Amino acid sequence: MEDSIVGMLATSKAGHDKESLYVIIREEGEYIYVADGQGRTIEKPKRKNKKHIQLIKKKRLAKPENGFNDLEIKRMIKEYRREREERDVKGRCN
């Protein structure tokens, strides 16, 4: 893992939320806290073991001075899904 993974987009590799997309909002030892802006908001983040996430290195949400915002998190996840969908469509067309 990198020194600071806070603000990075990540996918869950294990658990009932497997393959869910989240933004890492806090790091504490072996655990991270993630939010998706909807079911898991910044007020009620999900605690996950660092071993159970896969970082998406191309995406990072810059942490504002006053913390993260659920709307920004939702927007980032939606944008990533749209980009991934476009890549998949282009891949099938070739």
Image: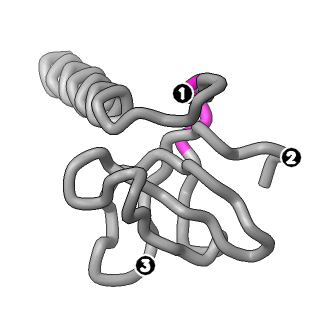
| CA–CA distance in space, label 1 to label 3 | 23 Å
Q: Amino acid at mark 2?
A: Asp
How many numbered marks appear? 3
* Quadrant in which the N terminus is drawn: bottom right
The range drawn in magenta is 56-62
Residue 3, which numbered label? 2
**Residue 50: x %, y % from top left:** 65, 70
Quadrant in the picture for residue 37: top left
- Circle 1 packing at 10 Å, graded few (<14), some (14-19), many (20+), is some
In front: mark 1 or mark 3? 1
Residue at the spot x=58%, y=39% of the render? 8
Q: Are marks 1 and 3 in contact (CB under 8 Å)?
A: no
The magenta stretch spans residue 75: no
**Residue 65: x %, y % from top left:** 65, 24
The one nearer the camera, 89 or 34, is: 34
Describe the element under mark 3 as helix, strand or loop. Answer: loop
Quadrant in the picture for residue 13: bottom left
| CA–CA distance in space, label 3 to label 2 | 23 Å
Residue 61, which numbered label? 1
Describe the element under mark 2 as helix, strand or loop. Answer: loop
25 above or below 73?
below
Give the mark nearer the N terminus: 3 vs 2.
2
| CA–CA distance in space, label 2 to label 1 | 15 Å
* Quadrant in which the C terminus is drawn: top left
Q: Can see residue 52?
A: yes
Residue where numbered disc 3 is placed: 14
